[in-house]
Structure formats: structure tokens, C-alpha cells
Amino acid sequence: MRVLLARRLSRVLSNCSSSPSSPTPTNALPNTLSSSPWFAIQHRGAKVRGSDVRLGNVIQRKGRIYQVLKAQHTQHGRGGATIQVELRDADSGNKVTERFRTDESIEKVFVEERSFEYLYTDGDTVVLMEPKTFEQIEVSKELFGKAAAYLKDNMTVHLQCYDEKPMSASVPKRVTCKVAEAQTPMKGITATPQYKRVLLDNGLTVLLKTEQQEC
């Protein structure tokens, strides 16, 4: 009887030791979340190829964090293709130009996107408000680039932040502007599309396609 009980106990212990006991990591990210261009968890260590680096990306390079301001692909014949990028240092704000091989491994940094309400611009500073807490923050106008001209009162804008530090800013894809002045279209019949210069109320000049009835 004792021998039989010992054998059964041995089988139970053997089965327990062979069964998987490691829990599923709680910090594992779903594929759909980590594959999106921006997600709310700051995460480092995602490797991408140089050919996949795009405008607005945040990368780690030589121990520093940079935002990609420009990215241009170039072909060098037998020398292979490269990508020339203009980078802005997240800490100093200094801009540098570097060249990556298209197959070079680059560490991409994911950032958090937050929504704010635009209040006003004071020189080179843009004042925003957090809509839930009503807390006001100041960011550099340079973060918006040329899109700063489209800022309007109470507009919802987006900041891309890394380690609580704004890296870039964007306005809505569609913005309503008023025409302050329009160039008189040229009369005549032509097969090619005609354009006219239009001055907007924000001071920007754009080209608009001339409607057929205006010619």
C-alpha cells in the first residue's frame, strides 16, 4: 500500500513540474496597438529600417532623442539608396542632418498624443489649455511649423509628447478660412487647368483652381 501511494504521489509531482507555470506578461502590448503610428504608452526599442523613417517620427540616435523634420530618399547608383534626414534634438532643440542606409536598423520611439484647446499666440509662444483640467501650458510656435498660420480661437490641436516633453504639434486636417483677396482669373479657352492666387484672412497666399464659369 505504501509503495502504491508513493508511486501515485511521484506521478502527481512529475505532472506538476512539467506543466507551464509562467504567467502571461502583463506588459505585453496588443499587435493592433503597438503597430499604430502613435499610441499612449511611451515605449522604446522598436526597430525599423532606415527606409521606413518618416517625417514626424521620433527616434533614438547615439543615446539622444530626435524628431524627424525632413526625410528624403536618394539613389547613388551602385552605391545603393540612402535616406537623408533633418533631425531636431529633443533636449537642446539643435538641428542636425544625417544620412541612413535604407537597410540600417533605427530605433523608433513611440510617443503619447494629447489634445489641447488653442487660446492665443504671444510672439514665438503658443498658449494652450487642457480641456479637462483647464490647465494652461506654453509651447514653442515652431512645433506647429507652417501650420501655425491656421491656428484659430478654441481650435482643438494635438501635441505629440515624449517623457512629458512636446515633440511636435498639429492642427485639424480641415480648416475653414476666409478669402481676403482674390486675383482676377485670365479669360480665354484653354485645355489646361487654370489657377488663381488667393490671399486668406490669415495672411497666407494659396493657389486655387479657377472654376470654368470664371473664365
Image (cartoon, grey):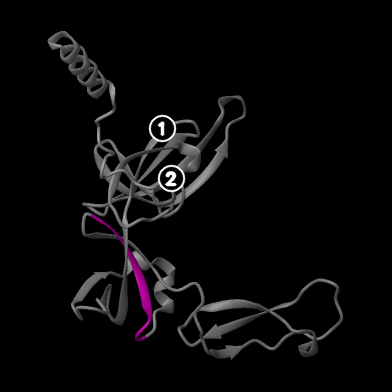
The answer to which of 169 and 30 lies nearer the viewer is 30
Q: Is residue 89 above or below residue 120?
A: above
Identified at 25% across, 37% down, the residue is 23
Label 2 residue SS: strand
Q: Is residue 140 left or right of residue 204?
A: left
Mark carried by residue 85? 2
Q: Is residue 68 left or right of residue 184?
A: left
Which of the 4 image quarters holds residue 148?
Answer: bottom left
Cα separation, mark 1 vs mark 2, equals 15 Å
Amino acid type assigned to the residue bearing label 1 in the image: Ser
Amino acid type assigned to the residue bearing label 2 in the image: Val
- Mark 1: give few (<14), some (14-19) or many (20+) Cα within 10 Å: some
Identified at 50% across, 34% down, the residue is 102
Q: Is residue 133 magenta?
A: no
Q: Quadrant of the N terminus?
A: top left
Which comes sooner in the sequence, label 1 or label 2?
2
Mark carried by residue 105? 1
Q: Main secondary structure of the magenta part?
A: strand
Residue 73 image point, x, y percent: 54, 42
Residue 179 image point, x, y percent: 56, 89
Identified at 22% across, 21% down, the residue is 12
Q: Is residue 58 above or below residue 129?
A: above
Q: Is residue 192 above or below residue 68?
A: below
The answer to which of 155 and 33 lies nearer the viewer is 33
Q: Which residues are magenta?
A: 153-162
Which of the 4 image quarters holds residue 168?
Answer: bottom left
